[in-house]
Amino acid sequence: MTSEPEPGSQEAAPTDIDALMRAVADGDRDAFADLYDAVASRVYGLVRRVLRDSGLAEEVAQEALVEVWRTAARFDPSRGSAAGWIFTIAHRRAVDRVRAEQATVDRERRAATANVPCDDLIEEVTARLEQQAVRRCLRTLTQLQRESILLAYYGGLTYREVADRLGTPLPTVKTRMRDGLIRLRDCLRVSWG
Amino acid sequence: MSDIHTLAGAYALNAIDDMDRARFDRHLADCPACVAEVAELTETVAALAEATAETPPVGLRSAVLDRIDRTPQLRPETRRTSGRRPLPRRRWLAAAAAVVALGGAGAVGYVIADQSRPDAGTRADAEARRIAAVVGAPDARMRTTATDGGRVSVVESPSLDEAVAVLTDLPAPGTGHAYQLWVIRDRTPQSVGVLATGRTDATELVSGVRGAQAFGVSREPSGGSTTPTLPLVAQLPLG
């Protein structure tokens, strides 16, 4: 990780992204170019974080962004923001790729990647959080809540893998992911509201 | 009930395998409160994408814009206006097929599952869930072709290694004849199912499509043939 994060000021506000998304759903290619500029750095960065490979990340980010174009009319604004929808598509694509690759690599290699220390991942990501609110709110979680969420999201792990990695029982990890996200949601809601 | 509900966090984080996802999707169909919770948690998770933003490679923008010029958009799904009552499971197959049919050519067409098999209840349910999973997969791709007044569509999900074939309003195959479905791999057609004699509509799950080049429909004597009779009634590329 040598690149700097995009300055927050270059990101379009959520409402702009929603408006762009509506135009994209109507087949507006210029609006899609603007939408690209608004979200590409977050889409690419997220995919690269999960895949840990720039070449692969470029390919998967491209697929995800084309998917956004292709399925734009299926986006339902009553179910959340356009940005949230776009990052979900990108994350899902990256995670699917990780799992497809994992299915083909041998056990030794799997064991080797399993040894990447999770503390490093968590510290690095937390340090890069531009948005003060998110960083502050993450600090309100318990360590287990935070670790479960960050390992799953940035590491592309399933909750079973997170449980293995943390040496924590499965039901506990499942529960911590949920109550951790609920606490994060409530904290962010207060900050943004 | 409460056990499955705790999956909401893992679900929002994409931290579940396909089996759990399918299980939870079923749960969501019966639990409007969970839909709302998942929407909020997904939104919360999206805030985490800020942390990893980084300038994409220079070529990405032009590559994406170039590709969207060649990529048609899907039509919107039809919305149910009469409240948000979940569908009974039996009807998922029809609903999934309707999504395919509507997305395919914009025409209205419902394809009803064949429930005449002896154990159709449980088998159709399991199949319906898998069909819904393919149609709803984020990497689902659909191709459609018109044929003699009818239509053949295939929705394919590479990640699930499955496809859903929807045949709508094909011409009657004629007395003692049936439509047969094929997957073509390395120029070799492999039968993936034969419809009942005379049947002109179907929704079929096709497993193991990875590496296949095409999907085909042929008209055969009842019960099917070992190799397709040419010319094919319809053919669509896969992959």
Image: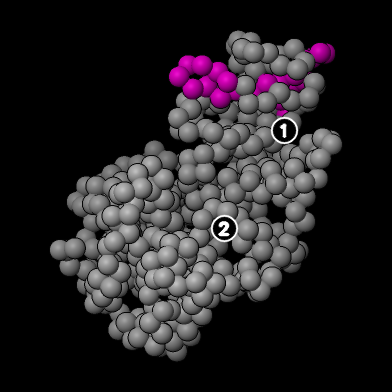
Q: Residue at x 76, y 39 (%)?
A: B113
Residue hosting label 2: B21
- Res. B228 image quadrant: top right
- Res. A43 image quadrant: bottom left
Tell me where residue B142 appears, x and y as whole percent: 54, 38
Q: Is residue A130 magenta?
A: no
Tell me where residue A60 appears, x and y as whole percent: 34, 49
Query: What residue span does the magenta drawing correspond to?
Result: B169-190
Q: Is residue B186 magenta?
A: yes
Find out whether the residues at labels 1 and 2 contact each other: C-beta distance under 8 Å: no
Tell me where residue A181 appears, x and y as whole percent: 47, 77
Labelled disc at residue B202: 1
Closer to the camera: disc 1 or disc 2? 2
Seen in the picture, residue A51 relative to A79 is either above or below; the reply is above
Q: Residue at x 61, y 37 (%)?
A: B164
Q: Residue at x 74, y 47 (%)?
A: B125
- Relative to B138, is B176 on the left or the right? right
